Image (spheres, rainbow, N blue to C red):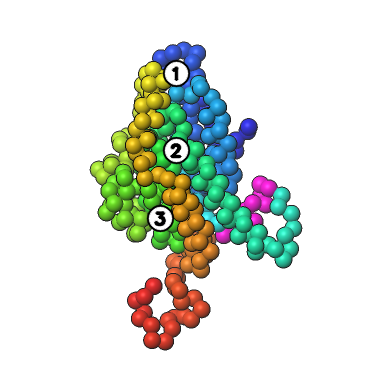
Amino acid sequence: MKYEALKWEVHENPSRPGEKCIGVITLNRPEALNAVDVRMRVELDILCDEILASNNVRAVIITGEGRGFSAGGDLKSEADPLGAGEQDFDFGNFGSYKELASYFFNDLRHEVLQRAFRKFEDLPPVVIAAINGPAVGIGLEICTLCDIRYASDKAKLGEVAVPAGFLPESGGARNLPKLVGIGRAMEMIMTGDIITAEEAEKIGLVDRVFRHDELMDGAFQLAVKIANNPYHSVRKAKELVKHYWNQNRTDEGWQRELDAIKEITRTKDCQEGIRAFLEKRDPEFRGPYYDNWPFPEGTDNNES
């Protein structure tokens, strides 16, 4: 398959000339700071199947094209699922059913994302994140799904979903607390604060920080070292580590996350967050009070 929102390359192991075994996934929407749109979600799902079908890939590096890793979800497609989808797919004329169809494709988009990220987290080769710039929202969540995280000294990381009216998804609410502790994870999730690569290393969110121009060399050297180890031992060791790491990962948990995302994207606060971003203004969240603003008579103004 020809990928567009991603690049997929398999490089030769310099220690074993002729053996192509080190895969590099590049998020490839630099004009949008590699925001994750519908096409990227579908392509990642298909690419994971391709990697799973191959026994040649011994290690995988994932990074971003251009000046950042990923700005998170593409809010333009969140604002109008059908309008965004028409660029890639022919949905036809829904007429009076357009609003219902919009809900359907909104749900489908999040289901595809979760399916792709579940496959990505379970890839047999060791996956190294090379975080070459901003990694926020879904961008950060991709990093938490990786086995090892290396960051450029120019990287910035944050879980920005809640302040924008969304929720962490793709395992973000599960993996972030395990990496940095529940208190720090709560602080990052509830505030949306962005932290530097150095701070991320201190709290265990990234494993090493490199000078920006040395990041990919560092990630590739690690991939080569892993690829030179016995194939079956590496895969079985990862399987064992992930088994214990994923003790709290259940189908029920994934479904709960998906149901919560579908519910939150239907709220007026979420829709206001999207509009505010697209209109380049501060959001005006009203909680349950959209139909009776500023506040219902006799209601405590601090309740929201």
Eye-nearest disc, 3 or 2:
2
Mark number for residue 160?
A: 3
Three-letter amino acid code of the residue under disc 1: Asn
User: Which callout, 2 or 1, points at the residue further toward the start of the chain?
Assistant: 1
Q: Mark 1 points at which residue?
A: 13
User: Which callout, 1 or 3, points at the residue further toward the start of the chain?
Assistant: 1
Three-letter amino acid code of the residue under disc 2: Glu
Q: Residues within 10 Å of mark 1 (few under 14, many from 20)?
A: many
- Residue 108 shown left or right of residue 250 in the figure: right
Q: Nearer the viewer, residue 247 or 234?
A: 247
For the question of whether residue 205 can be seen, the reply is yes
Q: Residues within 10 Å of mark 3 (few under 14, many from 20)?
A: many
Three-letter amino acid code of the residue under disc 3: Val
Residue 88 is inside the magenta segment: yes
The picture quadrant where one finds residue 245 is top left
Secondary structure at badge 2 equals helix
- Residue 123 shown left or right of residue 180 in the figure: right
CA gap between label 1 and label 3 equals: 37 Å
CA gap between label 3 and label 2 equals: 21 Å
Q: Mark 2 points at which residue?
A: 121
Q: In this view, does 263 lie above or below 179?
A: below
**In the rendered structure, which segment of residues is drawn in magenta?**
79-89
